[in-house]
Image: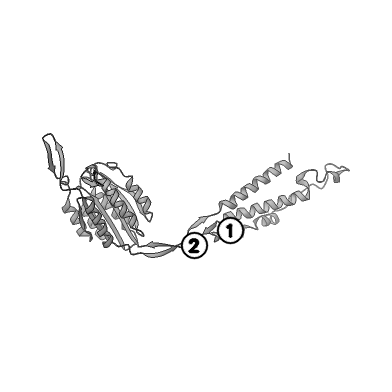
Amino acid sequence: MTTFSWPWMFFVLPLPLLVYFALPRTRTSSGLALKIPFYRELDGFYPGKSGKNSLWVRWLAIIAWILLVGAAARPQWIGEPLNTPISGRDLLLAVDISGSMKIKDMALDGQQVERLIMIKKIAGDFIERRQGDRIGLILFGTRAYLQAPLSLDRKTVNQLLQESLIGIAGKKTAIGDALGLAVKRLQKRPGKRKVLILLTDGANTSGSIDPLKAAELATEAKVSIYTIGVGADQMVVDTFFGQRVVNPSADLDEKTLKKIAELTGGRYFRARDPRELEKIYALLDTLEPVVSEDQNLRPVRDLFYWPLSAALLLAFLLMVIRRYEFS
């Protein structure tokens, strides 16, 4: 249906009449400048001077004024109600994009890929499943950045995750800053459930906030933090002396990650391969289920540009007519 957002604007419709009757009339000279015997034959010679033409020109002006007021009243089209699931949960995803995330120790579709590529694939599927949650994205390296604010637009958040690049936030790892930024964004949110999922493959090597201090702030703000340590335990590398087995996750600070989860009422998970990470996200779906309530939303579309365009077109037409009259 069509409605007007500002219907009180129609009270200005009689404004031209008020101006016409309220303002004093222009005084005219009582004497005639020129007397001609054939004045009646000249009546109607100029288009704008005939009574017929002036009448329909006046109607055009009235219609233009009505259309202009109608546009100012902000007409809107309101569609049928749509059921949108709303869970009331605010969920932030903090993803490590430091230099170590380029290590190729993850097997995905039969190929060894970088850790971040694996996270993009599985975390992207997780985001798409969270219908009804407000989801945001934090990317962190040497510094932490809010890449996507909390939103119901899962598609855009997922796209921003897929477009993230290793090293754009610096080569080091600022876990504490990422936690602090997440708490800052979540602490004033009205929802009861505020969740942060932190994915990292290292230890805190940068930033101004200690991770455990940030975890204490998260506890005060009632933010639950689930930490995920990413990286394989073993990896075969080629050296000058041949192949040897190394631990690519030697820098992973599991002790701190476990403590962060414990302080905030979350859990710590270890993801050594894509299958483990998939299981972790499936478990997160059960720990933080999407229990939603249907909220009726009606799509709204502004229509003011139609009467406004018509009013401008009529105004242009009147201007052309007036120019023709006095040419």
The answer to the question of whether label 1 and label 2 lie on touching residues, with beta carbons closer than 8 A, is no
Give the image location of residue 119, x and y in percent.
27, 49
Looking at the image, which residue is at 32% across and 54% down? 127
State left or right for residue 259 relative to residue 87.
Answer: left
Question: In the rendered image, which quarter contains the C terminus?
Answer: top right
Under tag 2, what secondary structure?
Answer: loop
Residue 30 visible in the displayed image:
yes
- Residue 126, image quadrant: bottom left
The quadrant in which the N terminus is found is: bottom right
Work out whether 89 lies above or below 139: below
Judge by depth and name the residue closer to the eye, 274 or 120: 274
Residue furthest right in the image: 37
| Whole-percent x, y for residue 183 in the image | 29, 55
Residue 61: x %, y % from top left: 68, 51
Q: Residue furthest front?
A: 110
N-term-proximal mark, 1 vs 2? 1
Tag 2: amino acid = Glu
Amino acid type, mark 1: Met
In the image: residue 245, left or right of residue 61 = left
Disc number for residue 308: none
Residue located farthest toward the left when viewing the structure as drawn = 241
Q: Which mark is residue 80?
A: 2
Mark 1: secondary structure: helix
Q: Quadrant of residue 14?
A: bottom right
Q: Residues within 10 Å of mark 2 (few under 14, many from 20)?
A: few
Res 96 visible: no
For disc 1, the marked residue is 9
